[in-house]
Image (cartoon, helix red, strand yellow):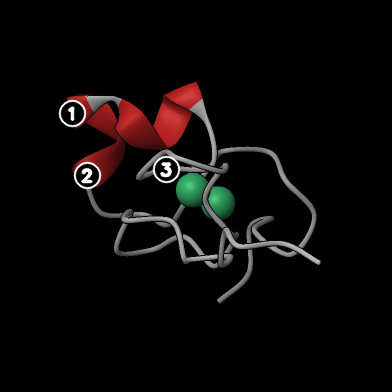
Amino acid sequence: MSTAEAKKCAHPSCRCEAQPGKEFCSEFCSSPRSSQAGGCQCGHAGCEKRN
Ligand SMILES: [Zn+2]
Ligand SMILES: [Zn+2]
């Protein structure tokens, strides 16, 4: 059992789950540069380039 609930990455274009205790799933998403349009490039499965 886990008390930590999986929450979504705060990146608008990211569909990953954030790391426990963090707002984002990756350093990429936590970077201001990641907020630019074009989709998430965190590299996680499910977040690959798709339209
Ligand atoms: Zn992502
Ligand atoms: Zn993310």
Q: Earlier in the sequence, mark 2 or mark 3?
A: 3
Q: Position of residue 21 (x, y in %)?
A: 45, 40
Of badges 2 and 3, the one in the foreground is 3
Q: Is residue 9 left or right of residue 2?
A: left
Amino acid type at circle 3 is Phe
Q: Are marks 3 and 1 in contact (CB under 8 Å)?
A: no
Dot 3 corresponds to which residue?
24
Measured in 3D between alpha carbons, the distance from the residue under mark 3 to the one under mark 1, in whole angstroms, is 12 Å
Dot 2 corresponds to which residue?
35
Amino acid type at circle 2 is Ser
Question: Which sits in the foreground, 6 or 30?
Answer: 6
- Specify the farthest residue to the bottom: 51
- Ligand 2 closer than 8 Å to label 3 CB: yes
Q: Are marks 2 and 3 in contact (CB under 8 Å)?
A: no
Q: Is residue 46 left or right of residue 22?
A: right
Q: Position of residue 37 (x, y in %)?
A: 25, 54
Dot 1 corresponds to which residue?
32
Label 3 packing within 10 angstroms: few (<14), some (14-19), many (20+):
many
Q: Position of residue 3 (x, y in %)?
A: 60, 62
